[in-house]
Amino acid sequence: MGPYDSIYGFAALGLDIFPVTDPEEGRHTLRGLAEGEYAVIYVTEGLAAGMPQEIEKYKEQLLPAIILIPGIAGNTGAGVRGVKASVEQAVGSDIIFGD
């Protein structure tokens, strides 16, 4: 999920894409995907920044996994921080060095 320019390449990999730029539409789309058959949902960092409460709802659930990815505007670091926090929680230690 995210702006079309940021996600259209994923269609070439066989992934379903959901072009969304408005956070309100993003919340609605995310809810629909989460209630459907999707186990992993990629969301651009920019879109996720506009709907933090909706993203937060799924952090404690096993599925779906919400993975933040950079958009064409660049990397904000939110995706890396999220993965780092998940790894720390899973193994009980910071095993990713560097920022």
Image (spheres, rainbow, N blue to C red):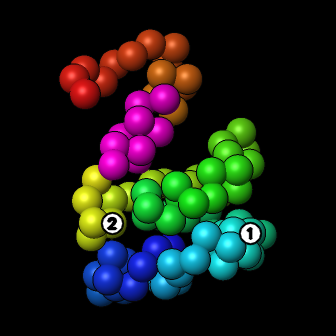
Q: Residues within 10 Å of mark 1 (few under 14, many from 20)?
A: some
Residue type marked 2: Gly
Task: Residue 80 in the image: state x and y as whole percent.
Answer: 36, 41
Q: Residue at x 41, y 31 (%)?
A: 84
Question: In the figure, 5 relative to 63: above or below?
Answer: below
Q: Residue at x 63, y 51 (%)?
A: 52
Q: Can residue 63 be seen in the rendering of this structure?
A: no
Viewer-proximal residue among 60 and 27: 27
Q: Which residue is mark 2?
A: 71
Q: Is residue 80 shown in magenta?
A: yes
Task: Residue 51 in the image: state x and y as whole percent.
Answer: 63, 59
Task: Residue 96 in the image: state x and y as whole percent.
Answer: 30, 24
Task: Residue 16 in the image: state x and y as whole percent.
Answer: 49, 83
Residue type marked 1: Arg
Q: Residue at x 71, y 39 (%)?
A: 60
| Magenta-drawn stretch, dominant element (helix, strand or loop) | helix
Q: Are marks 2 and 1 in contact (CB under 8 Å)?
A: no
Q: Quadrant of the C terminus?
A: top left
Q: Which numbered disc flags the more N-terminal residue, 2 or 1?
A: 1
Q: Which residue is mark 1?
A: 31
Question: In the figure, 86 relative to 40: above or below?
Answer: above
Range of residues picked out in magenta: 76-85
Cα separation, mark 2 vs mark 1, equals 21 Å
Q: Can residue 56 be seen in the rendering of this structure?
A: yes
Question: Helix, strand or loop at disc 1?
Answer: helix
Instruction: Report which quarter residue 15 is drawn in.
Output: bottom left
Question: In the figure, 99 relative to 40: above or below?
Answer: above
